[in-house]
Image (cartoon, rainbow, N blue to C red):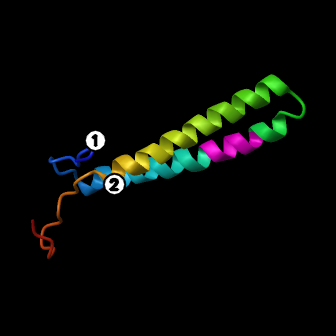
């Protein structure tokens, strides 16, 4: 018995595609900001740390959304062999 249960409501494939795009934008953007913050930290410590923390938080949100995506129940395409 898990804490999170899969959604019983099916979601359209278009929504899933948007969510997947958002996930990767958040992960890559967050990691890029984190690394840039490490370089900026050499010249301006407060700005660098704020970039590192912000980038890490954004990437973490992206990683959490991967878990959320795994629990979504997609709508089967018409004509597919998938049946429930």
- Residue stretch rendered in magenta on the structure: 30-36
Q: Residues within 10 Å of mark 2 (few under 14, many from 20)?
A: few
Classify residue 45 as left or right of residue 81: right
> Considering only vertical position in the picture, is 50 above or below 10?
above
Q: Secondary structure at mark 2?
A: helix
Residue sitting farthest toward the left: 84
Q: Residue 69: image x %, image y %?
A: 35, 51
- Predominant SS along the magenta part: helix
Closest to the observer: 35 or 25? 35
Q: Are marks 1 and 2 in contact (CB under 8 Å)?
A: no
Closest to the observer: 23 or 67? 67
Q: Secondary structure at mark 1?
A: loop
Q: Residue at x 18, y 58 (%)?
A: 75
Q: Residue at x 42, y 51 (%)?
A: 66
Q: Residue 79: image x %, image y %?
A: 12, 73
Q: CA distance from mark 1 to mark 2?
A: 14 Å
| Residue under pointer 2 | 70
Q: Residue 49: image x %, image y %?
A: 75, 29
Q: Residue at x 22, y 54 (%)?
A: 73
Between circles 1 and 2, the one closer to the viewer is 1
Q: Residue at x 83, y 35 (%)?
A: 40
Residue sitting farthest toward the right: 43
Q: Residue 42: image x %, image y %?
A: 89, 34
The C terminus is located in which quarter?
Answer: bottom left
Q: Earlier in the sequence, mark 1 or mark 2?
A: 1
Classify residue 47 as left or right of residue 70: right
Magenta region includes residue 67: no
Closest to the observer: 3 or 32? 3
Which disc number belongs to residue 3? 1
């Amino acid at each position: 018995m898990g804490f999170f249960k899969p959604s019983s409501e099916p979601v359209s494939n278009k929504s899933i595609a948007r969510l997947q795009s958002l996930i990767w934008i958040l992960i890559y953007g967050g990691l890029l900001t984190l690394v840039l913050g490490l370089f900026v930290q050499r010249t301006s410590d407060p700005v660098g740390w704020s970039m590192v923390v912000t980038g890490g938080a954004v990437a973490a949100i992206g990683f959490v959304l991967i878990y959320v995506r795994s629990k979504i129940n997609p709508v089967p395409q018409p004509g597919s062999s998938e049946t429930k």
